Image (tube, rainbow, N blue to C red):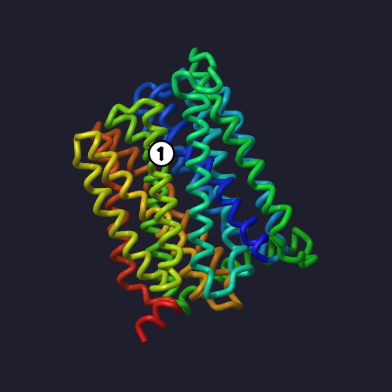
C-alpha cells in the first residue's frame, strides 16, 4: 500500500510543473513581457483567459466527477486530462514573441489549465480510499510537498538548462527559443512522472453502468448533492470559506511571475530564481505542516496558514525594494501548501463516508465555480488603475474573506479531539 500511496503522491510532482512553469513563473511572464502589446494589457488578457478556464472547470468538473462516481474508475479520466494538458503545453513551443500569437497562446494556456485542474479532481478523490483516517493529513501534505519539490526541480532544469546565459543547452535566443524550449520539457515531465500512478496505484472497480446511463444518473446525483448540502451546514460553510481563499490562491499562482516581472522588473532568469526559492519554502511548509495537520487538526492549520498568507502578502504590495520583495515572497511560500493540503484533509475527515464522493464533487465545485472571478478582478483592476499593485490587492481581500468564513467553520474530528 505504501508503494501505491507514494505513486499517488508522485502525481503531484508531475502535475506541479504545469502550474509552476506555465501558469506562474515562465510562460505567464513571457506572455506579458514578450507576446502581449505591453505588460498591463497582457496581465488583463492573461487574467481573462485564466478566468474563462476556471469557469469551464467550475461548471464541468463536478459533473465529470459525478459521472466517474457512477462509472467507478478514476484513472481513465486522469489519463485523458493529463494528455490534454501535456499536449497543449508542448504546443506552446510555437508561440513566438509577437502580438500575432496572443490568442493562440491564451487558448493553449486555457486548454492546458482545464486539463491539469480536471485531472486533479479525480486525483484528489482517490486519497480517502487509500490512506487511513489518522494519516490523511500527512499524505495530503506530503503530496503537496512533492509537488513543490517537483516544481523546484523543473525550475532548476529550466533555468540552468535553457534560460541562463551559458546554459547546458545553449539554444539561440532569437525569437525567445531558449524560453519557449521550456514548454516541451514541461510536457514531457508531466507525462513521465504521471506513469507511476497508472502503474501502481489501484483504481476503483468499474460499476458496469453504461456511459449514457452514468451521465443521466450523475446529473441527478449532482442536483441531489446541491440540495443535500443544506443538511450538512458545517460542510457548506467550509466550502464557502474555501471558495474564497482558494480564489485568492488561484489568482496568486496565475499572477506571481507576472507581478515580479512587471512591478519589480525581473527578467526571465530572475523570475525563475524567485520561483525556485518560493518552491523551496513552499515545499518545506507543506512537509512540516503535514504533521501539524494530524496533530492540531486541519481547521487550525488552515487558519494559521491564512494568517501567514495575509501578512507577508500585504507587505509585498507595499514594498518598493526588490530585496524586501524576495524576503516577504519567500516567507509567504511557507503557508501556500498547508492551506491547500489541510483543506483536502478537512473534508476527508468531516464528510460522511456514504456521501464522501459527492462531497468531493462539491469540493471541486467550490474550488472552481468562482475561480474566474479573482483573475478577472486582478485583470480589470490592473487595466483600469494602470497598476499591478492595485490589481493584486484583490488577492489579499480574498484571503481575508476566507479567514472570516473559517471563523464560522466548526472543528474537524481531530480538532474536536484536541479541544475535548
Residue at left offset 46%, top offset 41%: 50
Front residue of 99 and 119: 119
* Among the 4 quarters of the image, the one containing residue 34: top left
Q: Where, quadrant-wise, is the C terminus in this rendering? A: bottom left
Task: Report x, y in % for residue 343.
Answer: 45, 64
Task: Report x, y in % for residue 172.
Answer: 52, 14
Q: What number of labels is visible?
A: 1
Disc 1 designates what residue?
A: 275
Residue 45 in view (yes/no): no
Front residue of 93 and 181: 181
Q: Is residue 160 above or below residue 138?
A: above
Q: Is residue 282 above or below residue 191?
A: below
Q: Where, quadrant-wise, is the N terminus in this rendering? A: bottom right
Task: Report x, y in % for residue 24.
Answer: 43, 38
Task: Report x, y in % for residue 344.
Answer: 49, 64
Outermost residue, bottom side: 420
Horizontally, is 125 left or right of 383 in the view?
A: right
Query: Under tag 1, what secondary structure?
Result: helix
Residue at left offset 38%, top offset 49%: 281
Horizontally, is 160 left or right of 197 in the view?
A: left
* Among the 4 quarters of the image, the one containing residue 380: top left
Front residue of 61 and 310: 310
How crowded pointer 1 is (Cα within 10 Å; few <14, some 14-19, many 20+) is rated as many
Residue 235 in view (yes/no): yes
Q: Is residue 362 above or below residue 150?
A: below
Q: Is residue 76 above or below residue 97?
A: below
Residue at left offset 42%, top offset 69%: 298
Horizontally, is 120 left or right of 208 in the view?
A: left
Amino acid at each position: 500500500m505504501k508503494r501505491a500511496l507514494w505513486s499517488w503522491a508522485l502525481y503531484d510532482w508531475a502535475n506541479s510543473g504545469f502550474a509552476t512553469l506555465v501558469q506562474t513563473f515562465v510562460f505567464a511572464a513571457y506572455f506579458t513581457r514578450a507576446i502581449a502589446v505591453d505588460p498591463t494589457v497582457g496581465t488583463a488578457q492573461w487574467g481573462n483567459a485564466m478566468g474563462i478556464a476556471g469557469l469551464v472547470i467550475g461548471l464541468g468538473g463536478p459533473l465529470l466527477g459525478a459521472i466517474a462516481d457512477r462509472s467507478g474508475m478514476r484513472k481513465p479520466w486522469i489519463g485523458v486530462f493529463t494528455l490534454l494538458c501535456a499536449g497543449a503545453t508542448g504546443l506552446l513551443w510555437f508561440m513566438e514573441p509577437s502580438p500575432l500569437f496572443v490568442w493562440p497562446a491564451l487558448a493553449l494556456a486555457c486548454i492546458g489549465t482545464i486539463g491539469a485542474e480536471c485531472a486533479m479532481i479525480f486525483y484528489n478523490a482517490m486519497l480517502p480510499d487509500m490512506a487511513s483516517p489518522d494519516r490523511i493529513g500527512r499524505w495530503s501534505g506530503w503530496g503537496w510537498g512533492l509537488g513543490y519539490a517537483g516544481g523546484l526541480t523543473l525550475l532548476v532544469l529550466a533555468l540552468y538548462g535553457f534560460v541562463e546565459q551559458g546554459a547546458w543547452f545553449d539554444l539561440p535566443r532569437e525569437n525567445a527559443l531558449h524560453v519557449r524550449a521550456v514548454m516541451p520539457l514541461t510536457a514531457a515531465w508531466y507525462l513521465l512522472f504521471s506513469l507511476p500512478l497508472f502503474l501502481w496505484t489501484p483504481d476503483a472497480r468499474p460499476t458496469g453502468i453504461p456511459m449514457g446511463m452514468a451521465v443521466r444518473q450523475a446529473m441527478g446525483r449532482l442536483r441531489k448533492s446541491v440540495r443535500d448540502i443544506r443538511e450538512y451546514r458545517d460542510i457548506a460553510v467550509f466550502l464557502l470559506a474555501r471558495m474564497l481563499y482558494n480564489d485568492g490562491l488561484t489568482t496568486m499562482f496565475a499572477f506571481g511571475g507576472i507581478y515580479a516581472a512587471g512591478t519589480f522588473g525581473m527578467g526571465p532568469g530572475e523570475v525563475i530564481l524567485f520561483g525556485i526559492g518560493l518552491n523551496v519554502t513552499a515545499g518545506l511548509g507543506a512537509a512540516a505542516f503535514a504533521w501539524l495537520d494530524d496533530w492540531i487538526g486541519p481547521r487550525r492549520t488552515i487558519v494559521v496558514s491564512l494568517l501567514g498568507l495575509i501578512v507577508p502578502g500585504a507587505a509585498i504590495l507595499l514594498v518598493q525594494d526588490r530585496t524586501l520583495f524576495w524576503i516577504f515572497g519567500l516567507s509567504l511560500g511557507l503557508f501556500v501548501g498547508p492551506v491547500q493540503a489541510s483543506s483536502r484533509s478537512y473534508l476527508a475527515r468531516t464528510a460522511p463516508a456514504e456521501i464522501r464522493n459527492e462531497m468531493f464533487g462539491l469540493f471541486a465545485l467550490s474550488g472552481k465555480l468562482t475561480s474566474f472571478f479573482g483573475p478577472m478582478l486582478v485583470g480589470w483592476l490592473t487595466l483600469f488603475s494602470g497598476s499591478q499593485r492595485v490589481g493584486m490587492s484583490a488577492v489579499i481581500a480574498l484571503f481575508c474573506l476566507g479567514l472570516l468564513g473559517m471563523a464560522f467553520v466548526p472543528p474537524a474530528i481531530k480538532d474536536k479531539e484536541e479541544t475535548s
